[in-house]
Image (cartoon, rainbow, N blue to C red):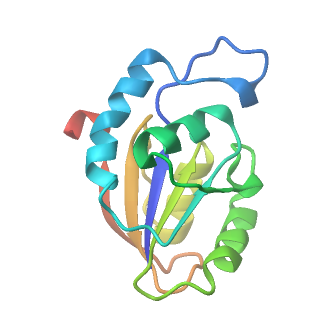
Amino acid sequence: MRLYCLRHGQASFNAATDFDRQLTDEGLSSLGAVQRALGRVGFAACFVSPYTRTRQTFECVMGQRQPVISEWLTPDTNVNTAIAQLYIATADLADDANVLLVLHQPLISKLIDALTNEPVPMMPASYAVIDIDVVAKGLGFLNEVVHLEQF
């Protein structure tokens, strides 16, 4: 499986709750480059945190496609819980499936590190590509990390 881990675009701090934070204008415009890079990937499944900014990020990158809203991708989720849920969610997919996760810090960096043993700082609108046969700690290969300034 090829796992694409995308951090949401730049978000505003002007919201009543963390859940309701929306993307800034800059955050929205920066996702055009991500859309050009990931929009042509054929994803077998897309899992997205329920937070507003991750749903907005997904919509900008993937358009009208419907994601699976996943409570296990929120910022405070324990990385072991996320790995277990990812294992369950992808168990029936083909070995060569492409899977997209849209999530937050600190979970995205913790997840990449746990799966690949490669600590990677993830800025807004950055994504990492992991090749992994079995979703488990240390079994993934970090194929690529793309930061916004590389677009």
**104 shown above or below 94:** above
**127 shown above or below 142:** above
**136 shown above or below 26:** below
Which of the pair 16/119 is nearer the observer? Answer: 16
Q: Quadrant of the C terminus?
A: top left
Residue at x 59% of width, y 32% of height = 53
- From the viewer's perspective, is 63 left or right of 33? right
**132 shown above or below 151:** below
Q: Quadrant of the N terminus?
A: bottom left
Q: Give the quarter of the image for residue 144.
A: bottom left
Residue at x 56% of width, y 66% of height = 114
Can you name the residue that lies furthest to the top here? Answer: 14
Residue at x 74% of width, y 31% of height = 19
Q: Position of residue 42 (x, y in %)?
A: 37, 68
Which of the pair 32/116 is nearer the observer? Answer: 32
Q: Position of residue 124 (x, y in %)?
A: 44, 34
- From the viewer's perspective, is 50 left or right of 109? right
Can you name the residue that lies furthest to the left here? Answer: 150
Residue at x 57% of width, y 79% of height = 135
Number of numbered tags placed on the structure image: 0
Q: Position of residue 8 (x, y in %)?
A: 51, 38
Q: Position of residue 102 (x, y in %)?
A: 54, 50
Which of the pair 26/133 is nearer the observer? Answer: 26
Q: Give the quarter of the image for residue 81.
A: bottom right
